[in-house]
Image: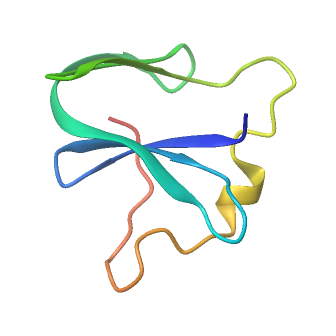
Amino acid sequence: MNTRVAVVDGNVEVWRNEYPAPVIVFTAQLTSFEGNVRAGYTLHTDAGTVIAGKDGGCGCGATLGTADLWAGKRRINTSL
């Protein structure tokens, strides 16, 4: 499944590649997290826990990487 996880304005968003455009399939307020960019992240929300990281041989959201998911908003790529 081609997905991307992002933290935007304090919310965890899970995007999935769909035709004709990506869609948000999960969103919830981030309450805490642990991890790092190398090991991946465990993101805790009121609605459940999201595990985010690279899987062996994954494209890591390659298709989603070219999508403008946050049109009109300033974007800064950073690790938590």
Colour style of the rendered protein structure: rainbow
Q: Which residue sits at x=81%, y=17%?
A: 56
Whole-percent x and y of residue 43?
31, 21
Furthest toward the bottom, the residue is 72
Q: Which residue sits at x=81%, y=30%?
A: 58
Q: Is residue 26 above or below residue 32?
A: below
Q: Quadrant of the C terminus?
A: top left
Q: Quadrant of the N terminus?
A: top right
Q: Quadrant of residue 39?
A: top right
Whole-percent x and y of residue 5?
47, 40
Q: Which residue sits at x=38%, y=69%?
A: 75
Q: Quadrant of residue 77?
A: bottom left
Q: Is residue 11 left or right of residue 14?
A: left
Q: Is residue 10 left or right of residue 4?
A: left
Q: Is residue 10 above or below residue 75?
A: above
Whole-percent x and y of residue 73?
31, 78
Q: Is residue 36 left or right of residue 22?
A: left
Q: Is residue 32 above or below residue 77?
A: above
Q: Is residue 74 above or below residue 40?
A: below
The number of numbered badges drawn on the structure is 0
Furthest toward the front, the residue is 19
Q: Is residue 9 left or right of residue 27?
A: left
Q: In the image shown, does 38 or 49 lie closer to the viewer?
A: 49
Q: Quadrant of residue 22?
A: bottom right
